[in-house]
């Protein structure tokens, strides 16, 4: 979700862009309200819209999400997937995962969804690829380790989408803390790694989109 939006783009610009987003249906609206009420970080609505477009264009068959939370992104991604697609998702907190399962069940997605409970860095080695679409929105200090574990499991042309890469604008400022420094290093990594073609966009709180070369 957006953080310190005035440090990423001007407030008037952000407000205007929000008016261009399509209205959310009843389920996603309730999920957004639930997330706001209970302090769950979920993808910003414009990030959700971007992922809809990317998934609809690519039509991936095996997706992996690192960071389920309440299942908002699972619903967004899953609605664009074909019935023969498999979407796997990882969440550490058992209770939050139970909430995600309830919301996702309500969505009645056509694709198969596989939920994994545990630490992402411990779950990822147990999963079989190849994956052709990745969404990372989890522990910011672990982004680079997620990438290292995932790259051998990705097919050529696989798409990697990473959220919160601007981190409220802090990555561009003289701010130093564990998450900010890790994201700054991660941004440099994905934009210079010869195995990837990457762009970082000022959508939501900053979205990285990479293609495996």
Image: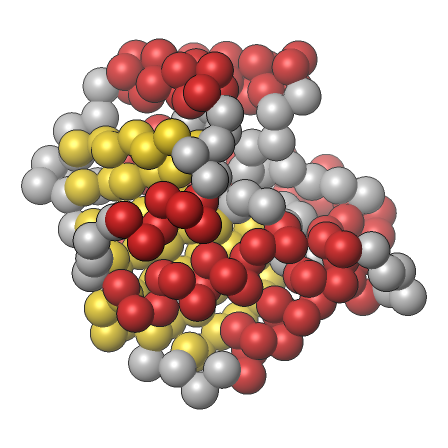
Q: Residue at x 32, y 81 (%)?
A: 213
How many numbered discs, if any? Answer: 0
| Residue at x-position 59% and y-position 20% | 35
- Residue 213: tell me if it is visible: yes
Relative side of 201 to 97, left or right: right
Quadrant hosting residue 3: top right
The part of the image, by quadrant, that contains residue 186 is bottom right
Percent coordinates x, y for residue 70 in the rendering = 47, 23
Residue 94 lies, with reference to residue 111, above or below; the image says above
Q: In screen coordinates, is 133 left or right of 174? A: left
Question: In this orientation, which residue lies closer to the viewer: 65 or 120?
Answer: 120
Image: 60 above or below 137: below
147 sits left or right of 186 in the view: left
- Residue 125: image quadrant is bottom left
Going 55% across and 57% down the picture, which residue do you hit?
A: 143
Question: Is any part of residue 16 visible from this angle?
Answer: no
- Nearer the observer, 140 or 29: 140
């Amino acid at each position: 979700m957006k953080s310190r939006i005035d440090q990423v783009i001007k407030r008037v610009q952000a407000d205007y862009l929000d008016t261009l987003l399509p209205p959310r249906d009843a389920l996603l609206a309730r999920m957004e309200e639930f997330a706001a009420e209970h302090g769950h970080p979920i993808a910003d609505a414009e990030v959700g819209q971007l992922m809809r477009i990317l998934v609809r264009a690519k039509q991936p068959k095996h997706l992996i999400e690192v960071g389920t939370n309440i299942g908002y992104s699972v619903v967004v991604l899953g609605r664009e997937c074909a019935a023969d697609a498999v979407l796997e998702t990882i969440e550490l907190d058992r209770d939050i995962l139970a909430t995600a399962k309830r919301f996702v069940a309500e969505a009645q997605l056509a694709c198969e969804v596989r939920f994994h409970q545990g630490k992402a860095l411990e779950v990822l080695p147990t999963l079989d690829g190849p994956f052709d679409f990745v969404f990372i929105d989890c522990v910011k200090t672990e982004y680079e380790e997620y990438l290292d574990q995932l790259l051998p499991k990705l097919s050529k042309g696989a798409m990697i989408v990473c959220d919160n890469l601007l981190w409220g604008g802090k990555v561009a400022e003289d701010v130093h803390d564990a998450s900010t420094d890790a994201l700054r290093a991660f941004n440099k990594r994905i934009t210079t790694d010869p195995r990837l073609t990457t762009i970082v966009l000022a959508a939501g709180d900053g979205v990285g989109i990479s293609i495996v070369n």
